[in-house]
Image (cartoon, rainbow, N blue to C red):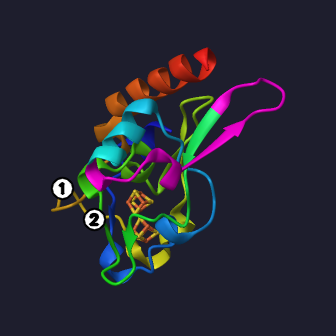
Amino acid sequence: MKELQVLQLKTDCGSCVNKCCSQPYDWVYLTTQEVRRLQEASGLTPAEFVSERQNSSTGYLIRTLDLPCRFLDSSTGRCAVYESRPLGCRIFPFYLDPLTGSATLYAAECGDNLLFPEGDCEGSWRLQDLAMDAQKWVEEFWAETIKS
Ligand code: SF4
Ligand code: SF4
C-alpha cells in the first residue's frame, strides 16, 4: 500500500471514452459539502444529479452521484464542473472505500490511458498528494451519514 501511495500516475483522459464518468455504477459517494459545491457550480438542484439510498440493515442514508454523469459534456468529453468535482472523481482511478478509508487502484478502467511517468511531469499526481483530503472526506462522510 505504501508503494501505491507514492506511485506517480497520470491519465490521458482526452484520449479516453470517459468510462469513469459514463458508466452507470454508483461508486461516487457524496458529502453534503460536495453536493452543495456541485449545486453552486451547475445551477442544478440535488434531485437532478444525486441518488439517495437507505441501507436496509443500518438505516444509513447514502448519497451518490447519478451515473452516467450529467456533468459530462459528451461533445467535448470534459467535466462541466471540473473545479468542483467530488473527491471520488479527483482520486480516480483509485477507489476510496468509505467504510475503511483505504484506496484501491482500478488500473483496468483507464487501460492504456493510465500512464506512470518517470518522476514529476505536468498533470501527474500521487495518491499521497490527496491523502489529507481523503482522510477529511471519510471523516465528514461518516459524521453526517451516522447522523442521518
Ligand atoms: S477512465 Fe481513466 S483515462 Fe478514462 S476518463 Fe476516466 S480517469 Fe481518464
Ligand atoms: S463530476 Fe465530472 S469527473 Fe465526476 S463523474 Fe461527473 S463528469 Fe466525471
Q: Which mark is residue 49?
A: none
Q: Secondary structure at mark 2?
A: loop
Which quarter of the figure is the C terminus placed in?
A: top right
Residue at image mark 1: 120
**Where is residue 1 drawn, in percent x and y?**
51, 39
Confirm whether residue 49 shows in the render: no
Residue at 47%, 70% in the rendered image: 110
Question: In the image, which residues are magenta?
Answer: 41-61
Please name the amino acid that badge 2 sits on: Pro
Is the residue marked 1 within 8 Å of ligand 1, measured from its CB?
no
Q: Secondary structure at mark 1?
A: loop
**Where is residue 26 drawn, in percent x and y?**
62, 53
Q: Which mark is residue 117?
A: 2
Residue 123 among those drawn in magenta: no
Give the answer, above or below, for where 96 lies relative to 10: above
**Distance from the alpha carbon under mark 1 to that under mark 2:** 7 Å
Q: Quadrant of residue 8?
A: bottom left
